[in-house]
Amino acid sequence: MHKIISLNLNGIRSAAKKGCFEWLPRQKADVLCVQELKAQEPDMTDAFLRPGKGAGRMHGHFHYAEKKGYSGVGLYSRAKPARVAVGFGAREFDAEGRYVRADFATHSVISVYQPSGSSGEERQAAKFRFLDLFLPHLKKLKKSGREVVLCGDFNIAHREIDLKNWKSNQKNSGFLPEERAWLTKVFDEVGFVDVYRKLYPEAGESAYTWWSNRGAAYEKNVGWRLDYQIATPGIAAKARRASVYKDTRFSDHAPLIVDYDL
C-alpha cells in the first residue's frame, strides 16, 4: 500500500508542540502534504525539514510565502522525487506559497493551499481570482496524461453533506454557490475524482476535517470537510481506504489519510 496524508498544520511550530512530528514517523506514510506552514526558511529546524530518523527520514520540499508567518506549503516523501516544482505560474498566489509538486516514476503528488475568503470581501475576491487561475492549471494537469494526486485545504465544502450547518452557511465563504460550482466543475468537467467521496459516498460527520475554534465546535463535531485528495481517475481507482485521524489534535484541521494500491 502507498499511504498519502494531507494536513493543514495551522503553523508548523504550533503543530510540532502538539506532537505532530512524533506522530508522523509512526504513520509510515509514503507522502505527507502539509499546508499553512506559517514559517519561512530560517524558522525551519532539521526535524521540520527532514522528519524521521536514520533511513526512515523523509525528503522535504517547501513553498514559503513571502509574507512572514503566513501560508506556505510543504511535501514530504520517503522516496526522493525525480522533479520538484514550486508555484503554478500565477504571480499573485505564488508569492503566497500555495503550491508544491513532486514527480515520481509513476505519478505526481501536489500539496496545495487554496485561499480562504472568510476574513472579508477583499480576500474573498482574491479567492475567486485564485479559482479562475487554478482551473486552467488543473485542466493542463489532466491533459498531461500523468497520474496526479492533489492534496490540500481547498477551503470549500462541496455538498450539504460536507458540513454540519449547511443551511445557515449558504452565504458564507467556503460554502458559497460559486465555490461549490467550481468544485463540481473540477470533478464533472475537468475529470478529477474526489477520492474520499468515491470510497464513502454517504459519509457525513465522520468526513469533517476542520472545526472552528468557537463555541466548542470540535467537541460537538460541528465541522466542515475542507481537506481533500483529488486525483486523476487511474490513481483514484486504486484508493482502497481513507480516514480522518482524530485521536490527537495537532491543528484546527485533522489529517486526511488515504491508502492507494500502488
Image (cartoon, helix red, strand yellow):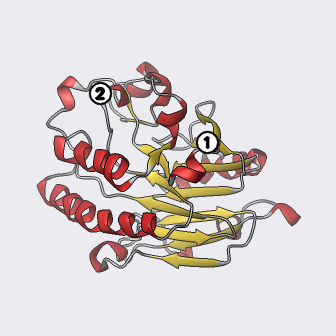
Q: Kindly identify the residue that appears in the image at 61 percent across and 71 percent down.
A: 103
Q: Position of residue 127 (x, y in %)?
A: 23, 58
Q: Are marks 1 and 2 in contact (CB under 8 Å)?
A: no
Give the distance between the C-alpha atoms of the residues marked 1 and 2, in whole angstroms.
22 Å
The part of the image, by quadrant, that contains residue 247 is top right
Q: Residues within 10 Å of mark 2 (few under 14, many from 20)?
A: some
Q: Kindly identify the residue that appears in the image at 37 percent across and 50 percent down.
A: 154
Q: Nearer the viewer, residue 180 or 64?
A: 180
Compared across the picture, whether 189 is left or right of 172 comes to right
Q: Nearer the viewer, residue 203 or 98?
A: 203
Q: Position of residue 207 (x, y in %)?
A: 48, 30
Compared across the picture, whether 226 is left or right of 117 comes to right
Whether residue 62 is visible, yes or no, is yes
User: In the image, is residue 129 above or below residue 171?
Assistant: below
Label annotation for residue 37: none
User: In the image, is residue 187 above or below residue 221?
Assistant: below
Whether residue 44 is visible, yes or no, is no
User: Which residue extends farthest right?
Assistant: 54
Q: Position of residue 28 (x, y in %)?
A: 77, 49
User: In the image, is residue 108 above or below residue 18?
Assistant: below
Q: Kindly identify the residue that appears in the image at 55 percent across and 32 percent down.
A: 199
Q: Kindly identify the residue that appears in the image at 78 percent across and 45 percent down.
A: 26
Disc 2: which residue:
160
Compared across the picture, whether 30 is left or right of 221 comes to right
Element type at mark 1: strand
Badge 2 amino acid: Glu
Element type at mark 2: helix
Badge 1 amino acid: Ile
The part of the image, by quadrant, that contains residue 136 is bottom left
Sooner in the amino-acid sequence: mark 1 or mark 2: 2
Disc 1: which residue:
257
Q: Position of residue 253 (x, y in %)?
A: 47, 42
